[in-house]
Image: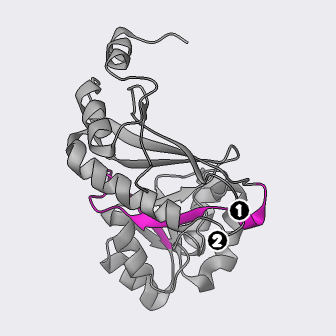
Amino acid sequence: MFRGKKYQDAAKQIEKNTLYEAAEGFGLICKTASAKFDETVELHVKLGVDSRHADQQVRGAIVLPNGTGKTVRVLVFAKGDKAEAAKAAGADYVGEMDLVEKIQKENWFEFDTVIASPDMMGVVGRLGKVLGPKGLMPSPKAGTVTPDVAKAVQESKAGKVEYRLDKTNIIHCPIGKVSFGPEKLTENFNALMGAIVKAKPAAAKGQYIKSCVAASTMGPGVKMSTAKL
């Protein structure tokens, strides 16, 4: 795979086999980020579980202490008082069947998070085939199917992230921007890793956290130490 000069220069500053403590690791990521835009910092955590088994799923959501640095566009399926509360809380789009039809007919996806009140799930269920593959389907586990839609909107806007295993038993999750600096990234990292550790399934055997790598959008990966967790 061809890598540009900036990437190669950055990679030289990172020791491949070293497990970095969070502050040092994020210091390196911030120092070596060279793109002209504010790069997102992502965490990739490989777990010692088997996602094919229902009792070894790892999934949840957490509001990061310093947010994600991203403006989140929130769509809410609600009616009546709940719809009004969602609007007041800052939801970008609020509706019922009208939004379902807009998504179905216009292939409209100008939103990042979908929240629904429980009584709307019969309507939202029709969108399972299009929202599911994009990771946008609301779910009680992620706190996006809830009677308190206003609170869910506020949390999404404040920097709530959802973490879940992919088919290769890895969690990929953004934890902020390079402009945050090492200290804020470390705080977000500790919060997310704490949540992942707490979510350990009872059925998981052996080493739970196999590896943890952080990287900016255009930068090389930095192996993070998880010994303290």
Asked if the stretch drawn in magenta spans residue 70, the answer is: yes
Residue at (32% x, 71% y) in the render: 90
Kind of residue indicated by mark 1: Gln
Residue at (39% x, 26% y) in the render: 218
Q: Is residue 83 visible?
A: yes
Q: How is the image coloured?
A: one colour
Q: Is residue 111 left or right of residue 169?
A: left
Q: Is residue 69 visible?
A: no
Considering only order in the chain, which callout, 2 or 1, is on the residue closer to the N terminus? 1
Residue 226 position, x and y percent, is 44, 48
The residue labelled by disc 1 is: 56
Q: Tell me the tag on residue 124.
A: 2
Measure the C-alpha gap from mark 1 to mark 2: 27 Å
Instruction: Look at the picture and state if 222 lies above or below 8.
Output: below
Magenta-tinted stretch: 52-76
Instruction: Look at the picture and state if 182 lies above or below 222.
Output: below
Residue 58 position, x and y percent, is 62, 61
Residue 121 position, x and y percent, is 64, 77
The quarter of the image holding the C terminus is bottom left
